[in-house]
Image: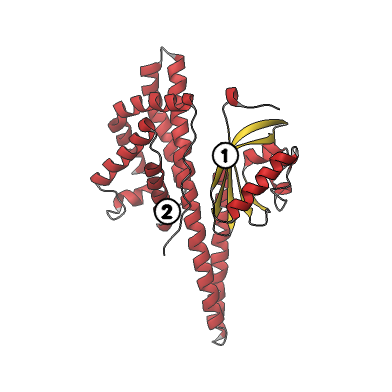
Amino acid sequence: MNVSLPKVTIPKLTPDEKEGLKDYWRIYEAHREEVTGQLIQMASQHPEFKYIMQNTDSQSSAEEQSRSRDLQRNAVLQNDWEPYLNNLQRQGMGYAQAGLSFHGWFEIVAAFRKYMMPHFLNSYGQSPEHLLSAMIGMDTLIDIVLSNIGASYLETKEQLIRTERRRAEVELHKLNEELEQRVLERTHRLEHANQQLEDSEQEIQKILDSMSTLNAKVDLDGKLLFVNKIAALASGISIQELMGTSFLEGQWWAFDPEVQSRVKDAFAKARSGTAINYDEKIFAFGQVLTISFSLTPCWEIMAVSSTFWRKQEISLS
């Protein structure tokens, strides 16, 4: 099956975040082989990553691993993000097509933080400023990696499930005139596909809730389909109450007619297939803030992402 993925969105990093990435990279590059060895040992005991390591067809070649490192280095040190993000998308797509869950990635990330921390302390222990900068840089890169791998993983999962669901529906229609037992067997397949879709939607919610950015999925008519936890907290309304309401008429934008008009215009452009990214104002956490606002068309829905600037760059009304 050919899977279509949206165009990657290049992260807009502050000068502090860029410097933090460099502080992190200096330590990571110096201890990469040691940390990688620890991660490989941990992954070899993991129930899902063990499968990848034992399956030679699933493993990356030494040349591919070297190229991946070069792409990451160029992104961090030269701000050349697009090739690296495209590579992350392919990884996420591969994990979905292999039938692996996304949960294992959170365990790998937790282990990576654990293995890096002693090296941060040894190098920057006498400089709290550099220590904090390196930790922010590591978390910034982790957010970028998980966001891109997670987005392509979920998009691939949804497309695979939709394809299977359509196939099951067609087969069920053709088998309507056959024996009742055959019909019951095909009906079971359809129910299984529906359960997979439901499980995928629950996994989407978990991954969205783990992100530090405001994320949502919106129907083409503006109806909210998914909202992550931080977006609900920002609105002051529970996720259950937000579901099915209008994204365009919500209190995020209704505080200012000009802001609401711009958001509606951006939404209309995104519906035509144009990815949107610009700075916008939002009413969240009881105040007006400035965010990096993104709209990404995905099949028959719209992906919304909003990133708050760091505290010193928040604009208050």
| Secondary element at image label 2 | helix
| Secondary element at image label 1 | strand
Disc assigned to residue 278:
1
The quarter of the picture where residue 262 lies is top right
| Residue 237 placement (x, y as % from top left) | 73, 41
Q: Can the viewer see residue 252 in this picture?
A: no
Q: Which is nearer the N-term, disc 2 or disc 1?
A: 2
Residue at image point 43% right, 24% down = 19
| Vertical side of 5 occupied by 138: above or below | above
Disc assigned to residue 93:
2
- Cα–Cα gap, marks 2 and 1: 27 Å
Quarter placement of the N terminus: bottom left
* Discs 2/1, front: 1
Which residue is more in the foreground, 249 or 114? 249
| Residue 37 placement (x, y as % from top left) | 30, 35
| Residue 240 placement (x, y as % from top left) | 71, 48
